[in-house]
Structure formats: C-alpha cells, structure tokens
Image (tube, rainbow, N blue to C red):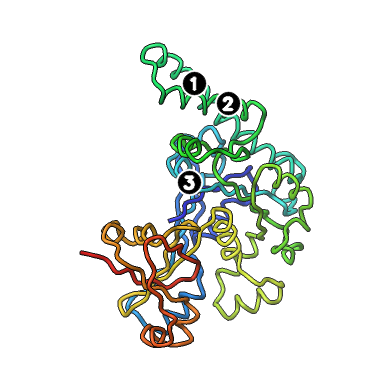
Amino acid sequence: MLRAGLIGLPSSGKTTLFQLLTSAREAPRPGGRTEAHVGVSRVPDDRLDQLTALFKPKKRVPATVEFADMAAGRGDAKSLLDVAAYRHADALLHVVRAFRDPAIPHPQFTIDHARDVRTIEDELVLADLGVVEKRLERLDKDLKKTPSADLRAEQSILLRGQSVLEDGRALRTLGWPPDDAKRLRGFQFLSAKPLLIVVNLDEADIAHADDPARAAASLRPIAESIGAGMVGVCAKIELEIAALEPADAAAFMADLGLSQSGLDRVIRAAYDLLGYVSFLTVGEDECRAWSIPRHTPAQAAAGAIHTDIQRGFIRAEVVRWDALLRRGSLAACREHGELRLEGKDYIVDDGDVINFRHAT
C-alpha cells in the first residue's frame, strides 16, 4: 500500500483534502499528543471495474492509498519526525493555498504560493538537519571507541547530507547512489521523501485543475527546483461533488470542465511521482488490483500477493487487460496467442493481468 502524509500551512485546506481523499466525515481535532489522523482511499481503476463486470466475482478489491493528516494547529516538520505515519510515508503531499476567501485568513495575510512552498521546505530541511547533527555527534563518539568501515561509510553519507541541508536544500534534490540512498531510507528523512505539491485552487480557477500552473504561475519554477511534482484540485468544490450521486457528480464535473475527479488526479500524480503501476488478478472469487514500483520483475511482483508465491515462483501467465476484456475469457486469449508465459525476470507492465504459477 502506498502511504502519503499531508503537510501544509494552517488554512491551506489540507484537512478538507484529507476528507475528500478518504471520505472522512469529520476533521481531526487537536489533542494533547502529536499524532496523525489516518484514512485509506480506494484507488479508482476503470480497468478493474470492467473486468469485475466481466468475471462477476464475489469480491472486487481495488488498490489502496493511506493518507495521514495532522490535527488542526499541529504538524510542524520537527514534530512530524515523531509521528510514525509520516516517518514511514512513501511521499509527502504539500497542500498549497491558491483559493481566495476573506472569511479564512491566511496566516501570512497574503496568498503567495512560492513563499508558502519555501516556508514548508525550510521546515523539512531544518528538521532533518537536526537529526543529522545528532547522529553525527553519536557517530563521532562511536568511531573513537570502536572504529569500523560501516560506521565510517555512514558518517561519510551523513556529512554529505549535512552539507546539502546546511545549503538550504532538501535531500531529495541530490542524486544518491543506490547504496547511499538505501542507508538514507533507514533514517526516514522528511526532505528525502518524494514531494507532490497539491495546489488547492479557487473555485473560479477550477477549470485549470489539469494545469494548476496557469492559476499559480510562480509554482512551476520552484517545483522544478526542489524536485517536486504538482497537481491541482479545488478541495471544497470537489468535496461537494463527492457527496453527490454518480450521475449528478458526472454532470457537475462536466459543467465545470473537469475530466477527472480530484481523487483521481491526486492519486495518479502520486503514482507517477513514485513510479508506481498496477497489475491485476482475476477470477470467480475476486478481481483485485495490486500496486508495485515500476520496473518490478515478475517474481518480486508475486511477493505483493504473498511471500510464499514469490518463493515458489515458477511462471507468470500474463495477458493485457484490454485483450482479456475484448476476448471475454482467459481461455479465448490463450487460443489467440495473447496469453503469454513469462519468467521471473519479466518486467511487469501497468495493466497486466497475471496468474502466478508457483510451487506449494
């Protein structure tokens, strides 16, 4: 399951977005402890819907995304280091206010997208710098007592990270060799996580949801400079749309010029940012979507279902979802040569329908 943490300044609309993404009915309330409100969203997938209609299984199981939000008035970057839902998040979603509403004052009094992004980015950098400095102090003591190549390697990586952070840059902006990146992941640095800027648009700008830079032009250069993706929503209006019946929602979206719901856009942007794809499994018992990183080989993809299937992997029976839909059955796909047998090194593609053969 993909995990994402929502961050942003007060009055940016991040809690409204959380409600939109997770169908939560109530906003999280501030409490005495720093903890996250967590909700799960089902990933919209038209391919799964069509295959479910074809197979009529007992269960339809979509892929899911877990979102975390801090209670109102809490959630500065330093405090997030102590919150498991943020430490273990695969990505951070920074909600940036672009809507104009005098009834909801901005904490900085004016709407300035670039300033708000920089403010939160600086918080992430400073929070991580504190962690790095503390760990380097400990490493210095440990190396004096019991020098080792492993500790020196860790020290070298952290010194490089310290230099980047002291320069005011997020760790995600620096290309790290795979081994170094693996070590960094163990620290769960916030500024090393992929970042998606979610532009919370004004109702008047909702037609620009597919190209939010048209409504917030100052964001594109800063998003590129900090290595962040960008997507637009109008959380308030889309929350109202989500409460409508499907036919009414579709009509309302058409009137607004929206080709996708806010949920679709945010999840698709998060998948693209992280390089995730989905493969599908089908049958009479269930039709299910599974999320995996792009370029995952078949044997590793089998592990998303169960580690026993990965260990006992023999072959993968693979067919494209649209070919299966067109032919109407796996048997027909096999007859037409569209069902292939692939080995453990086959790279799973988005939309593959797979049956894993495995030893029990």
CA–CA distance in space, label 3 to label 1: 24 Å
Q: Which residue is mark 1?
A: 136
Which residue, given by chain and number where applicable, does mark 3 sit on?
Answer: 89
Position of residue 342 relative to residue 176, above or below, is: below
Spatial CA span between label 3 and label 2: 22 Å
Question: Can residue 350 be spotted in the picture?
Answer: yes
- Disc 2 element: helix
Q: Which residue is mark 2?
A: 162
Q: Are marks 1 and 2 in contact (CB under 8 Å)?
A: yes
Residue at horizontal 65 percent and vertical 60 percent from the top: 233
- Which kind of residue does numbered mark 2 sit on? Gln
Instruction: Give the foreground label among 3 and 2.
Output: 2
Residue 179 at x, y = what percent?
47, 37
Q: Position of residue 268 (x, y in %)?
A: 57, 62
- Amino acid residing under circle 3: Ala
Q: Is residue 16 left or right of residue 340?
A: right
In the figure, residue 127 lies in which quadrant? top right
| Position above or below: 276 against 153 | below
On screen, residue 134 versus residue 284, left or right, reads right
